[in-house]
Amino acid sequence: MFTKKELKFAYVLAACLLVVGAVSYAAYTEEELKQPRRMMFKVVAGNVLFDHQTHTSEFGYGISCGDCHHTLSEDEYADAQSCSECHELDEGDEEVPKRADAFHQQCAGCHEDFDAGPFKEECSKCHVK
């Protein structure tokens, strides 16, 4: 077996490693993102994964915030909320369409206009189970 001295050394070493691990974890926290990287829209027709970073990056589509967050001025982009803040899930009208209609107009319309990404005719390109 182990001597008392060896056990004491093992306990002290374990405690030191635990402290070093906790301090290291706390020292390198992930910085808060200014915008989400990806968002999952959960809908009955199948969830839609939206890659925010690809759409806004200069190496991706390079679209501006105002292209989607169309009611905000440039100085309000940092405060942009989810689409559900304005577009309700089940109710809508011509002025503020319901969320699904707004997505289909905004997202599918943009993809058709620029001949990029998934298209409206192939629902399974965006909607996955």
Image: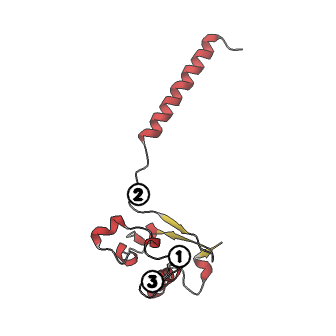
Question: Given the current orientation, which residue lies at the most extreme top position?
Answer: 4
- Which comes before the other along the chain, label 2 or label 1? 2
Q: Position of residue 121 (x, y in %)?
A: 58, 87
Q: Residues within 10 Å of mark 1 (few under 14, many from 20)?
A: some
Query: In this view of the protein, can residue 33 be seen by the observer?
Result: yes
Residue 33: mark: 2
CA gap, disc 2 to disc 3? 26 Å
In the figure, 127 relative to 11: above or below? below
Quarter that holds the N terminus: top right
Name the residue at 40% across, 68% down.
57
- Direction left: furthest residue: 75
Residue, disc 1: 89
Residue type at tag 2: Leu
Give the image quarter of residue 28.
top left
Which three-letter amino acid code belongs to the residue tagged 1? Leu
Residue receiving disc 3: 110
Q: Secondary structure at mark 3?
A: helix
Disc 2 vs disc 1: Cβ atoms closer than 8 Å? no
Q: Residue at x 45, y 82 (%)?
A: 106
Viewport quadrant of the C terminus: bottom right
Q: Tell me which corner region of the image, top left, top right, bottom left or bottom right, holds residue 53.
A: bottom left
Q: Position of residue 45 (x, y in %)?
A: 63, 77
Circle 2 crowding by C-alpha within 10 Å: few under 14, some 14–19, many from 20: few
Give the percent coordinates (x, y) of residue 113. Answer: 44, 87
- Nearer-the-camera pick, 36 or 100: 100
Question: Relative to residue 84, is residue 26 depicted above or below?
Answer: above
Instruction: Give the amino acid type for the residue marked by disc 3 in the picture.
Output: Cys
